[in-house]
Amino acid sequence: MKKVLVVDDSRIMRNIVKNTFASLHIPCEFIEAGNGNEALLRLSEHRIDLVLLDWNMPQLSGIDFLKKIRAMAQYATLPVIMVTSEAARYNVIEALKSGATDYIIKPVSERSFKEKIEKINF
Amino acid sequence: MEKYIHPFIEVCENVFKEFIGMELSAERPYFIDKKDVHDWDISAVIGLTGEARGAVVISMKKNLAIKVTDMLTETKHIDIDDEVLDAIGEIINIIAGNAKRGLEEMFRLVISLPTIVRGVNHSISWPNEQARIICIPFKIMNEETFSLLLAIEATN
């Protein structure tokens, strides 16, 4: 079964992201992390197929986590979708330049997940 | 100030409708003084830095904070607990992050992580000395109210 790493410092938001993603009926197991450092740990513990990544988090932000993993050969092509409230175009551009596969602006919807997931053939 | 307020009103109405499922109506905004005392029970604060500085704050009574959390989590809460703090923090985070889009022609902003302040008659320490604080009152379903407070000034 595919593994989806949900990274968000808000537990409520992690649940909403998981429930919205689950509504697509794609069989997968969710792994959770509350910040970028925890996410690095989860990546080393599990074979992750997709990362759903918040931007603003304590300790290690989503964007810094993204830059870190893109510098590591084993995660160079790992699909990472930013799921964030950062809606300004300059934020979207920065994330895509830093290696994000795609970008979803909160609040999340089933439709936005469906569109992005289809694009990456998950 | 109006050009700064509008994105926040629009985003706040959308976020409550799309994210929580509550219809809002914005009432007439007004200036408040830093020293004004309010009777809110909980506030969530996000600092704004970058090409402007300031803060945006959502303040509400306990009952509304609980009701909003109940709707977001589909579970019942009886008091302000960690989940309520999480919910209110996430709401202001989504409002501030989405409002950046409407302000991007004016300045690039960086938003902080939310800070939660709670307690009867609590007060907010505003970061700017000069910027005026505008209060945008919102009414939910013609019953409960909350306020979005905004202080913002360009740094250059």
Image (spheres, grey):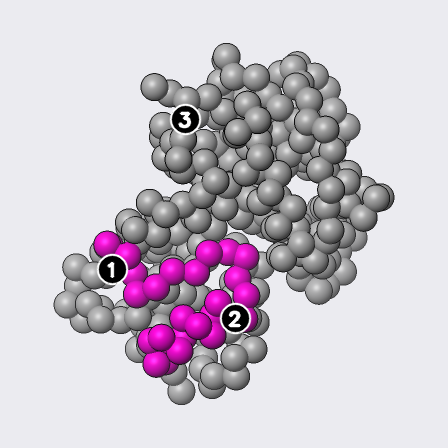
Q: Quadrant of the C terminus of chain A?
A: bottom left
Percent x, y of residue A42: 35, 67
- Please identify the quarter of the rendering in which residue B2 is found: top right
Q: Which residue is mark 3?
A: B52
* 3D distance between C-alphas at marks 3 and 1: 28 Å
Residue at 81%, 42% in the rendered image: B144
Q: Chain of mark 2?
A: A
Query: Looking at the rendering, in which quadrant would you find the N terminus of chain A?
Result: bottom left
**Pointer 1: what residue?**
A99
**Callout 3 and callout 1 share a chain:** no
Which residue, given by chain and number where applicable, does mark 2 sit on?
A: A111
Image: magenta residue range: A96-122
Chain identifier of the residue bearing label 3 in the image:
B
- Kind of residue sitting beneath label 2: Arg
- Mark number, residue B77: none
> Residue at 28% across / 57% down in the picture?
A96
Element at label 2:
helix
Q: CA distance from mark 1 to mark 2?
A: 23 Å
Residues tagged by mark 3 and mark 2 found on one chain of the structure: no
Asked if labels 1 and 3 touch by Cβ distance under 8 angstroms, the answer is no
Total numbered labels: 3
Residue type for callout 1: Gly
Which of label 1 and label 2 is nearer to you? 2
